[in-house]
Image: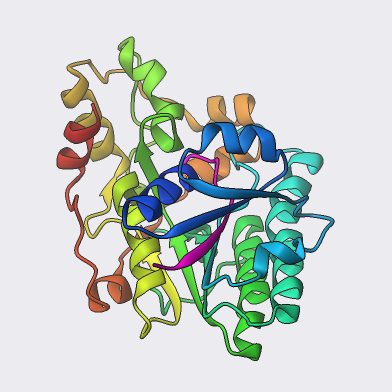
Amino acid sequence: MANVLVSGGTGFIGSRVCDALHQKGDAVYVLSRDPARAQSKLDSAKAVYGWNPETEKLPIEATSDTNAVIHLVGETIAGRWNAEKKRKIRDSRILSTRNLIASLSEADPKPETLVCASAIGYYGGNNHESLTEASPAGTDFLAEVCAEWEAEAQKASEFGIRVVLVRIGLVLGLGGGLLQQVLPPFKIGIGGILGNGRQWMSWIHIDDVVGILLHALESSQIHGPLNATAPTPVRNIEFTKTLGAVLRRPTLFPVPIFGLKLMMGEFADFIVLSQNVIPERTEASGYEFYYRTLESALNALL
C-alpha cells in the first residue's frame, strides 16, 4: 500500500483517480481549497488538507510519509478567453506547480514519484503531421503555458524525485471534458462539423486517462512525457459522424469558424486546432488501452 497525495482530487479526472487509488488499496490524501467540501465529496480520501495553490506551500503534514504525488490542479480552458481568464489558466498551473515543488524540496523523506498533468496543447496547432512525445513544443499561448508548467514540474528531478509528465488529450467522459461541451447541440440534432472538418482530434476515454496516470505512478522505469491520447485520433468530420450515429441524431449543420469566434473569442482558435497526437512512448512503456477506437469509447459512455 502506498500513501498518495493528489491535488485537484475533486475534479473531473481527479475524483476518478482518487477512487481508483482507493480501490487498489492505496491511502489517498487530497489537497483542496475547500477541505470540508472535498471531504464530503470524496469517500476515498483518508484526509484532506487545505491549500491555496497559487499562493501557498503545502502544509507540512501533507508531505510527511508521502510515497507519491499526482498533481492535477488547473483552471479549465473552456469558456471565452480574455486577459483575466488567460491569467487564471497560466497561474493555476505554473504557480501551483512552483509552490508544490518548493514544498517537496523541503520534505523529509521526499516522495519517490511526481506524476504531473500536462496537455497536448504543448504541441501547438501543428496542422496534420503526427506528433509524438519527442515532438517539440509549439509557440502559441497554450503551448507556452504547458512548456513552462512542465519545466516547473521537472525541477523535482533535481532532488531525486522521478517525474512523469502526462500530456492529456480531449477527454471523453460523462460529467465533464469534451462531451460536456458538445453533447447539448448534438442531442437536439443541431450538432455538426467545425469549419471544414479536416482538423485532427486526439481524444481519449476517461478510463484510459486514469489508467495512464496510475501506470505512470506504478512503473518505476518511466520518466518524462507520456501522451494520454488514444492510438487512433480522428478528423473532426469523423468524430461528428460517429457521435451522431451513436446518438442517432443528424449532423447536418456545419459550424462556421467566424461564428465560433463571435461566441468564444480566442478560445475558438483552440477548438479548431489540428493535433494528430500519437501515444508512442505510452504504448512502448507497456500501457494497454481500454478503448482504442472512438466508436467503442462513445458506445461505452452513451
Q: Residue 277 location, x and y as percent?
A: 35, 62
Position of 237 relative to 151 (above/below)? above
Q: Nearer the viewer, residue 164 or 237?
A: 164
- Confirm whether the magenta stretch covers residue 175: no
| Residue 187 shows up from this direction | yes
Q: Residue at x 40, y 46 (%)?
A: 19
Position of 241 relative to 116 (above/below)? above
Residue 29 image-quadrant placement: bottom right
The segment highlighted magenta reads: 1-12
Can you name the residue that lies furthest to the top here? 188
Position of 246 relative to 60 (above/below)? above
- Confirm whether the magenta stretch covers residue 2: yes
Q: Nearer the viewer, residue 22 or 175?
A: 22
Residue 267 image-quadrant placement: top right
- In the drawing, does residue 70 fall left or right of residue 89? left
Q: Residue at x 43, y 25 (%)?
A: 255
* Figure quadrant of the N terminus: bottom left
